[in-house]
Image (cartoon, rainbow, N blue to C red):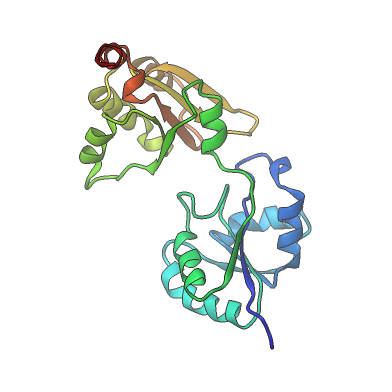
Amino acid sequence: MKTTGKLYLVPTPIGNLEDMTFRAINVLKEVDLILAEDTRTSAPLLKHFGIDKKVYAHHQHNEHKASTEIIKFLVQGQNIALISDAGTPAISDPGFFLVREALKHDIEVCCLPGATAFVPALVNSGLPSDQFVFEGFLPVKKGRQTRLKKLAEEERTMILYESPHRLLKTLAEFAEFFGAERQISVSRELSKLYEENVRGTVLAVKSHFENNILKGEFVICVAGASETPKVKEKFYKEK
């Protein structure tokens, strides 16, 4: 009796190709086919590591429809790997829906450890990392202000992703909702040649990026409300 295949979620480097693990390379070489967020982006990576497999597109616009066919392949016994453009699949990238469908069909799912942008950004931010909340991308329009108002009261360190063309707008909103003196750390081009980590108040960091080129992927770490002096003072008095 033929057993079902296995779905692998394989992290890929967020910039530096040396961050690819030996296990990730081996899995990609051994599976029957690979699902990629963008086949054009993944092609150079796979070629670099000598991985010659069938690659199919699996992204946010086709994942619901494509998952039905993928589940059939897995049920038939094929092993399949999912990769995103960079980092770990399903973390602000496609993957969640496919994983849930695979589990519904009792298909084994294995997520390999590996690169993801928010971990190094948090660790090198200097902000508390014992407890934190990952927010991914803020809503672009609907629900954005409501979300910011709620986050203004969050006491844990917050981690967000942002694109270059929205960074300054987001920092301006942080000054409005969190206060200009809230401590933040903004990382860009993590693991790459021009990696940059800018730490300070919202106002100071915003000023820095107003006078520098906005390029690359950005990770923002924001101190929780309990880290601000006024809240700290009130917190300890109440205790």
Which residue lies most toward the bottom here? 1
Q: What is the tally of numbered marks visible in this picture?
A: 0
Residue 16 against residue 7 in the figure, above or below: above
Identified at 73% across, 41% down, the residue is: 18
- In the image, residue 70 lies at what x, y percent? 54, 75
Q: Which of the image's four quarters has the N terminus?
A: bottom right
Relative to 43, is 209 on the left or the right? left
Relative to 136, is 153 on the left or the right? left
Q: Which of the image's four quarters has the C terminus?
A: top left
Identified at 31% across, 31% down, the residue is: 154
- In the image, residue 10 lies at what x, y percent? 63, 56
Residue 6 seen from this side: yes
Of 163 and 174, nearer the camera is: 174
Of 15 and 131, nearer the camera is: 131
Identified at 46% across, 26% down, the residue is: 186
Residue 188 seen from this side: no
Of 68 and 235, nearer the camera is: 235
Residue 215 against residue 201 in the figure, above or below: below
Residue 139, located in which quarter of the rendered image? top left
Relative to 154, is 48 on the left or the right? right
Residue 46, located in which quarter of the rendered image? bottom right
Which residue lies most toward the front here? 239
Residue 19 against residue 49 in the figure, above or below: above
- In the image, residue 4 lies at what x, y percent? 63, 78
Identified at 23% across, 24% down, the residue is: 176
Of 232 and 125, nearer the camera is: 232
- In the image, residue 37 lies at what x, y percent? 53, 59
